[in-house]
Image (spheres, rainbow, N blue to C red):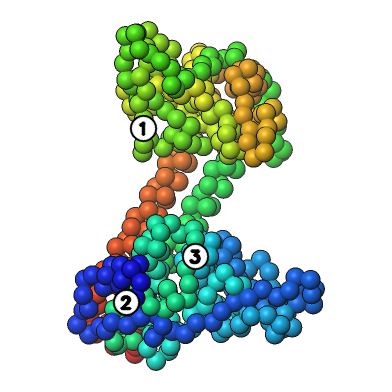
Amino acid sequence: MSTKLDAAHSILLRTGVPQGWQETNVGIIARFAGGGTPDREHFAYWRNGTIPWITPTDLTANDSKFITGGAESISEEGLKNSNATLVPKGSIVFSTRGTVGNMAIAAVPLTCNQSCEILLPNDKKIDGEFLYYLLNFGLSAFVRLSGGTTFGSITRGDVSHVCFAVPTEEDEQAAIARILDAVDTALKCSRAAITRARELDHSLLHDLLETGLHPNRNGKQKRPAQWKPRRLDEVADVGSGVTLGKDVSGFKSVELPYLRVANVQDGHLDLSEIKTVRVRVEEVENYRLENGDVLMTEGGDLDKLGRGTIWEGQIPDCLHQNHIFRIRANRDLLDPAFFALVVESDIAKRYFNRVAKRTTNLASTNKTQVRAFQFPVPPTTDEQRDIAAIMKAAKAKLAGLIQKERALAELKKSLMHDLLTGKVRINRNLFKEEKRS
């Protein structure tokens, strides 16, 4: 056995074999079927195909335990004239190249390309859904050992020799799978709720910025006449940040935390990693952030262009890098929380996408363009604050849903470890009741 498989073996069985379980490997409890790609020049192999043909890309895009199809299908003729194998419902297809270890259970008969392998569970030795969870739990550890990254490749031989301990009773396997499936179902519902909430928030923000707090009774979207378009430099000061790498030797200096582009996300801050920079003492006030400053990135990748959020003083004496603009509102004319919503909106995204300097996959804006950004402003800051308060409540609900989803994900991770290693055993009576039902 190779060194990496020895390592995988020791990781997966490091807690020993629980009573009533036995050591086995993937090659014993399942058989393999390979994939292939029909000749692209034979249109008959692809035109009007009825057999789902799965690729690693399809597995990456799939957000379910089951998969019914991918971007393409092949014909019966294409199947016969390639190395692709038609496998039954219940087979497990997983990627062995590219993003290694993505997998799903076939919900219908299907096939795959040569960058995937398909496992057909031995019904006499292993419950199919239990094997799916076992592979998810064990293969991820194996992939980490085989290079520390999921982007690469593994072979059929690698996978077939990976060892596990499994319950000898299939009832116990099925019960474990059902528990994990219940958590998966809850996770799926939670993620669907997050998606719906995000869509509703986007729609709500659009409506608030287009019709205000009191839309026309006839239902037509029309911005209130009192909302006048204002240039940003009419209602706020735009400041640039500290440039890294400056030589401050010979000057009185101080080391302070600063925000990078990675810290400023679309609508929120990621403060998980904060770096520091040494600056001249007399320059600190130029770059020090104040509570209520709105931060906006100058660009980079397209998704970084003009994204931003509000600073709420989370870190004392924090500065900002020169690739982040600091917008300090005139509080008599512009509420910072309202403007932070404008930055998140389609109004800002359309403007910066239009004026940005572009190269291949990159875009950037400058201080002049930021200062010239024109947007509708309600006449009173009270109205602006009311709009911001409505969106804050909506975002709080979304944050609660995200927190719940994270808790469920942690629960699943913990349950997979405890149940699939036998650390926590399920009452045998539950197996019998499950079987009778």
| Residue 153 - label | 3
Left or right of 56 in this view: 279: left
Q: Secondary structure at mark 3?
A: strand
Q: Secondary structure at mark 2?
A: strand
1 vs 2, front mark: 2
* In-front residue for pair 144/87: 144
* In-front residue for pair 248/426: 248
Residue to which mark 1 is pinned: 274
Q: Is residue 63 visible?
A: no
Left or right of 270 in this view: 175: left
Q: How many marks?
A: 3
Residue at (57%, 69%) from the top-left corner?
Answer: 115
Separation of disc 3 and disc 1 at Cα? Answer: 34 Å
Q: Amino acid at mark 3?
A: Ser
Residue at (29%, 87%) from the top-left corner?
Answer: 168
Q: Are marks 1 and 2 in contact (CB under 8 Å)?
A: no
* In-front residue for pair 402/358: 358
| Residue 164 - label | 2
Residue 76 in percent (x, y) is at: 72, 83
Residue 181 in percent (x, y) is at: 40, 71
In the image, residue 286 above or below residue 364: above
Label 3, residues with CA under 10 Å away: few <14, some 14-19, many ≥20: some
Residue at (79%, 77%) from the top-left corner?
Answer: 44
